[in-house]
Image (cartoon, coloured by chain):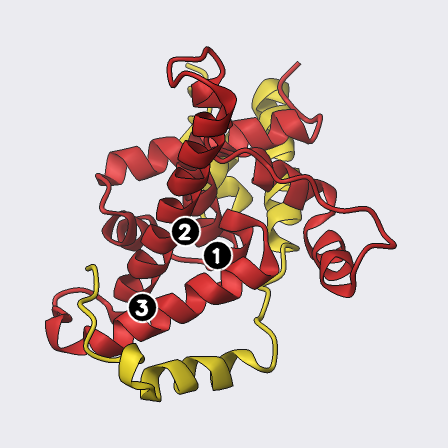
Amino acid sequence: MFSLVYRMVRDRALAEDLAQETFVKVFNGLASYRREFKFSSWIFKIANNAAIDHLRRRELDTLSLDGPTDAPTRGNRTGQVRQLPHRGENPLEELEARELGGAIEQAIGRLRPEYRACILLRHVEGYPYEQIAEMLELPLGTVKTYIHRARNELRAYLGDAHP
Amino acid sequence: MDAPHLSPEEIALWAEGLLPARRAIHLADCARCRETAERERRLFVALARVERLTPSREFADGVMATVNSPQGSGRTPES
């Protein structure tokens, strides 16, 4: 779960805060847990919502600083990749650069948040499509489409797209 | 009649080793599908190497401290 949140927000300290917030919500909400859902799905759902909420808030903050909300680049800012620091900065930033600095990690970071969550849940966490749909509250067909598009984008970012 | 080209879903199944042999055999005769499948396999290999990252050692202590604090309990979760 931490892995997902970290790759969604691409900031280790923030990811720990959001993961902590998730566990506290899970602990406090045990009474409202519905048994027809897998427990892991419920946790991932809360974690993903926390990450998405943060990204939305960050986008709003960016927009309010940058000008009118109908600026042409608005849509492109969602899930914008935070630039990873260069080596020689503080130890936490160096750790982030090492963990998220590889080509595939950079490519995943460029995906829009919905695609990123789907591809991480499928390929890193290994969940079946049906469970991902449950976690993200999306129709199964949408999850399949997102994953298919995400793979195409990843190939393009990695320079391995269809000629 | 030649077998139809593999669909994107079938290509993904092949990359995961789950495509039935009766369809996978198409790759032996079709350079186009073979090329697409090989690209898919390379991406799957790259994704398989993505590590699951873990929080710091202090993380669990922080969670327990928050849960045990008066402010950490009694909040309504989203679900």
On the same chain: label 1 and label 2? Answer: yes
Subunit under mark 1: A
Secondary structure type for disc 1: helix
**Residue displayed at 59% across by 24% down:** B29
Is disc 3 placed on a helix, strand or loop?
helix
Is residue A14 found left or right of A129 in the rendered image?
right
Label 3 sits on residue? A40
The chain carrying label 3 is A
Q: Which residue is mark 2?
A: A51
Q: Which chain is red?
A: A
**Quarter residue A94 falls in:** bottom right
For label 2, the SS is helix
Asked if residue B28 can be seen in this view, the reply is: no
Residue A16: image x %, image y %?
51, 66
Chain at tag 2: A
Residue lying farthest to the top in this orientation: A72
Disc with the residue nearer the chain's start (1 vs 3): 1
User: Contact, CB < 8 Å: mark 1 with mark 2?
Assistant: yes
**Label 1 vs label 2, nearer the camera:** 2
**In the image shown, does B76 or B5 lie closer to the viewer?**
B76
Identify the amino acid type marked 3: Ser
The answer to whether residue A53 shows anywhere in this view is yes
Assign the N terminus of chain A to one quadrant of the image: bottom left
Query: Which of label 3 and label 2 is nearer to you?
Result: 2
Report the front residue among A66 and A52. A66
Q: Quadrant of the C terminus of chain A?
A: top right
Distance between the alpha carbons at the discs numbered 1 and 2: 9 Å
Q: Residues within 10 Å of mark 1 (few under 14, many from 20)?
A: many
For disc 2, the neighbor class at 10 Å (few under 14, some 14 to 19, many from 20) is: many
Reading the chain from its start, which is encountered first: label 1 or label 2?
Answer: 1
Percent across and percent down for residue A55 are: 43, 42
| Residue labelled with disc 1 | A4
